[in-house]
Image (cartoon, rainbow, N blue to C red):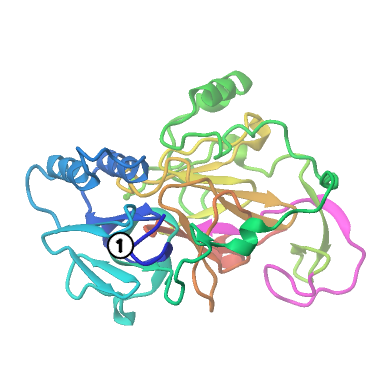
Amino acid sequence: MRGEDGVVEETRYVAGDGVLLGAGSRWLLLTDPGDERVLDELWSMLQGPPPPASRPLTERVMEIVDRAFDGEVPDLVLLDLTSGSPVSTSRGAGRLRVEGQRHHLSLSEPAVITPAAGPARRLLGGVVPARSAEVSLRSAAGNDGAGLIDGIPQEILAAKGPAGPPPRRPRPATPRPATPRPGDSVARDTTEPDPALMARIADAAPALVEQQPPTRVPAGSDQAPAEDHDGSTVFRPEHLTAAPAGETVQAVWCPQGHLTRPTSALCRVCRTQVAPQHPQRVPRPALGGLRLPTGEVVPLDRSVVLGRRPQPMSTSPADWPHLVTLPAEHTFVSRMHLHLSLEGWDVVARDLGSRGGTTLKVPGQAPVRMVQDHPYVLEPGHALDLADTYEVRFEVGPEVGVSGP
């Protein structure tokens, strides 16, 4: 997608109380309408095919905005680079400033990302809370366009591959499944629960779906869960009091009796030296805890699914996860947003194709935006920020109430 002097190379934003929507050549920054349906409608408009000349994109977007804000004038700035020359519209405190190849969008003056405004995060596309953004174009300076087709050098266009059929690909060590897993984000619409999946769960384990409604369990307590003040819930039925049967790992013991992986010289819990010993296969212990913003700790003795309406990733009752339900007001968080699985001694996080995205925060390093369905192995102290609004942290040690073998 081309802009005025080149293609869109990068978009960065600063988190804030507005909303940034878009990808590629279309970007919209506006006051948060507080209605997920409005955001979905705007998102579909920006991602759709080029509108007809009779109804340009600006007119269609403004029609949605006027309806959402009941005729009031919100702060807004729209940038469209699809046609080859920039088209922009602003309202209220919305501002657009162009500096060479950089287009600065802001809901206040000055319309520029500065270090004082906060850290700028890279965004390929989506819907995130933001107060300013910068859309940068790849410069075409020094190139007269001769011998290029859509920016591709002639020598690349004229290149030919080797003669004969392509070589056979080696068979992968682990064959891929023929069909997607139930709940796989590639085939799942995260805006609504999958009725077929819920029906299969009901057939496989009727006792599980007849449990009382999801409620919270205070950290370190074995009592029945109770509703928390912020409305977020953790579905933890009575049958989840122990780790799934059959999950075993090779382990050694530290002097305090904690189990840890054989390749580690220090105990994963108390960090004391582990004496040389022959590892033994034992039931896998809880690998730590997932601390929520409310202070509660979800034990990592099985997988965890987080979202505004989470559901199991498998129909097997033995694989039933902890379901962490976020309050309805977290509209940037998808219904199925984040999945944590236990693979041997590793805690692996995957973003489930969420709309608002997930940011991995490693102490001492720059935040990383997680790639959809890509596995990220967590270490103690790593934090996961769901849609820049709800942050959870992986912890290990006595302070999380998960320290025994």
- The N terminus is located in which quarter? bottom left
Q: Which residue is mark 1?
A: 130
Q: Mostly what secondary structure, the magenta segment?
A: loop
Q: Looking at the image, which is closer to me, 295 or 50?
A: 50
Residue at the front extreme of this rendering: 146
Rendered position, 247 above or below 212? below
Spot occupied by residue 395 in the image (x, y as percentages of width and height): 57, 64
Q: Could you say whether the residue bearing mark 1 is in a helix, strand or loop?
A: strand
Rendered position, 243 above or below 111? above
Which image quarter: residue 206? top right
Q: Residue at x 17, y 73 (%)?
A: 109
Kindly identify the amino acid type of the residue bearing the numbered disc 1: Ala
Residue at the right extreme of this rendering: 278
Spot occupied by residue 63 in the image (x, y as percentages of width and height): 16, 41
Mark 1: few, some, or many residues within 10 Å (few <14, many ≥20)? many
Q: Which span of residues is magenta-colored?
A: 264-291
